Image (spheres, rainbow, N blue to C red):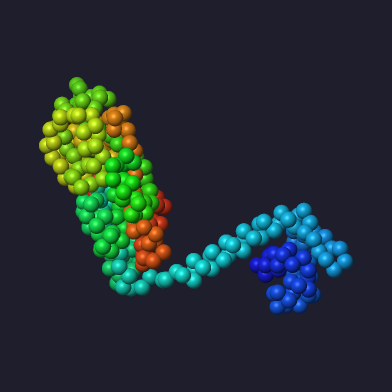
Amino acid sequence: MTLSQIQTFVVVSQTLNFTGAAQELGITQPAISTQIQLLEEELKTRLFNRVGRRVYLSQSGLLFLEHARQILEKVALTTESVTRFRPVSKTDPLNLGIGFGTGLKDDAPFLNYLRGTYKNATVQSHQALDADLIRGLEEHSVDIALTQIPEETPALEEWTGKMDLTPVVKTNILVVAAPHAVSQNWRRDPRILEEYPLILPAKRTFFRDYVDSVLARLSLKVNIALETHEASLIRKVLLSGMGIGILPASSVREDLDKGLLTGLSVPELSSGSILGILTRKNDLSAIPSPIHLGVRIFTSGWIRLGTGAA
């Protein structure tokens, strides 16, 4: 079965006349007959019923017509995508902004892959507060922002109205502490947040916006001992037993699995958190091809995110 045979079949099904189809395709009528005959032999069924000089679609022909049109549409889309694709040049930049709780290190496979493939291209990454990453996207100084976004973040609707959000991993939000620091008092009650020093993400991050909204809604009076945009620093403080934190489970997964930290699921903090990619709204078709590649690598699950690196 060839693309030419499929296209010929579709034109004949529209004209219901071999001569008319030949004129439309710019080939001879015998060539049309041969194409249809070969197609029917391969499919082992008649696609047309012939009455005099007129032809009509058989039941098998009607079924095949639907598939034939889908094939031609996919071919057209593929041709358009390949035609529009701009190969990576040595000067194509990639500016990656890393937000809170991603676990992405500067030597992550994603960045090493890009740097190894595009040795002379500019591949840069930097950590920043989510608000600054959003501004960078708007000002075109950031191409991709990777960060944690709780599903109930107050500003989520506003920002996703301006940006495209591509989910990578969804995780739970946990109250986290070293086991020895909370062994006597660990319970699924939001008031536990008032009983220990809190180690929190910095303000102007999606994650902190969500935490603040929960604390305000519950009217909790908490003691914030430390706030930082570095999840790795929060992790170190929690391991020392100097307080409790509120974190996406994915950012401390290895410590939880090893029993170095314990995580508590509190119903009032039940929003899931999305580790997601933010790009400019409807801009993926226009931005440099390394960014397409970056989004594909992130969402493929090929990269391995480290523990609390950002």
Q: Is residue 105 left or right of residue 298?
A: left
Q: Is residue 125 visible?
A: no
User: Residue 103, percent across and down?
Assistant: 27, 48
Quarter residue 189 falls in: top left
- Of residues 71 and 136, the one nearer the viewer is 136
- Vertical relation: 181 (above or below) 170: above
User: Residue 60, percent across and down?
Assistant: 76, 55
- Of residues 150 and 198, the one nearer the viewer is 150
User: Residue 207, percent across and down?
Assistant: 25, 43
Q: Residue at x 32, y 70 (%)?
A: 92
Q: Residue at x 13, y 36 (%)?
A: 224
Q: Is residue 195 left or right of residue 305?
A: left
- Vertical relation: 296 (above or below) 263: below
Q: Residue at x 66, y 60 (%)?
A: 68
- Vertical relation: 238 (above or below) 69: above
Q: Is residue 40 visible?
A: yes
